[in-house]
Amino acid sequence: MTKRSSFGRILLKLSGEALAGDQGFGINNNVIKEIAKGVGAAVETGVEIGIVIGGGNIFRGVAASANGMDRASSDYMGMLATCINALALQDALEKENVYTRVQSAIEMAEIAEPYIRRRAIRHLEKKRVVIFAAGTGNPYFTTDTAAALRAMEIDAEVIMKATRVDGVYDKDPLKHNDAVKFDELSYIDVLNRRLNVMDSTAISLCMDNKMPILCFNLKDPVNILRAVQGEKIGTLIQ
């Protein structure tokens, strides 16, 4: 029997790069299937899950603007990339018999519902996984900020940020063997140390609204289940 969730409702933040796996770009079918299985196992614990997904595996707005493209235009292109990822994740989840809805901050009626807070909460109450696409719908804001915003709006208890490493380190553990992992951090520590967890706007929003952030490794999708069951994994920021 599956152990019950320690949370009633969570916001899971997935980077676009997570869907690419080791190939580095695009969508890796094997990786997205494993992520869908991990989310499906978590849903069975009774937790309600909203997901904000990035688009960096397809298009990075900031990188494009650094190369001379207009920032607003490049950000909108990045938002459209998140919609592609949202539809791919929806398909993978429904193959695992998980009921889903995609809500987009940019209206595109043929493929997704418009983002409406009350409708999103109703879907969650009906145990559907709601995938939030197109970030906040505004340029100059990252999907990290979108995750913080949606977490507040749906009354999530925690943001679970799935990353390529098993928590927050004082420097990049993929480049430095002497990197030190933190088990717990305060929001101020993250901002003062300039730790690359989420952008400063997202961290400040979480700090102002006392929204905890749990960072953990998605390379093993079982960690999603472990996280919702309250196991001590990753780094907790609160």
Image: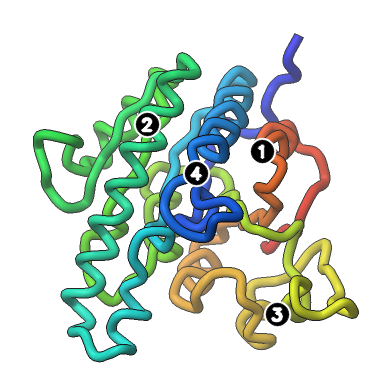
Please tell me which of labels 4 and 1 falls first in the chain.
Answer: 4
| Residue 28 circle label | 4
x and y, in percent, of residue 213 in the image: 62, 57
Residues at discs 1 and 3 in contact (Cβ within 8 Å): no
Whether residue 130 is situated above or below residue 216 in the rendered picture: above
Q: Earlier in the sequence, mark 2 or mark 4?
A: 4
204 above or below 119?
Answer: below
What crowding class fits label 3: few (fewer than 14 Cα within 10 Å), some (14-19), or many (20 or more)? few
Type of amino acid under label 2: Gln
**What residue would you read off at disc 1?**
221
The residue that mark 3 highlights is 189
**In terms of depth relative to the viewer, which is nearer, 155 or 18?**
18
Marks 2/4: CA distance? 14 Å
In the rendered image, is residue 13 in sight?
A: no
Q: Secondary structure at mark 2?
A: helix
Q: Nearer the viewer, mark 3 or mark 4?
A: 4
Between 58 and 42, the residue placed more toward the observer is 58
Disc 4 on helix, strand or loop? Answer: loop
Rendered image: mark on residue 90: 2
* Residue 144 seen in the figure: yes
> Is residue 118 rendered to the left or right of residue 107?
right
- Mark 1: which amino acid? Pro
Residue at image position (47%, 69%) is: 202
Q: Disc 2 to disc 3, how far (Cα)?
A: 36 Å
* SS label for mark 3: helix
* First in sequence: mark 1 vs mark 3: 3
Query: Are the residues at dot 3 and dot 4 in contact (C-beta closer than 8 Å)?
Result: no
The N terminus lies in quadrant: top right
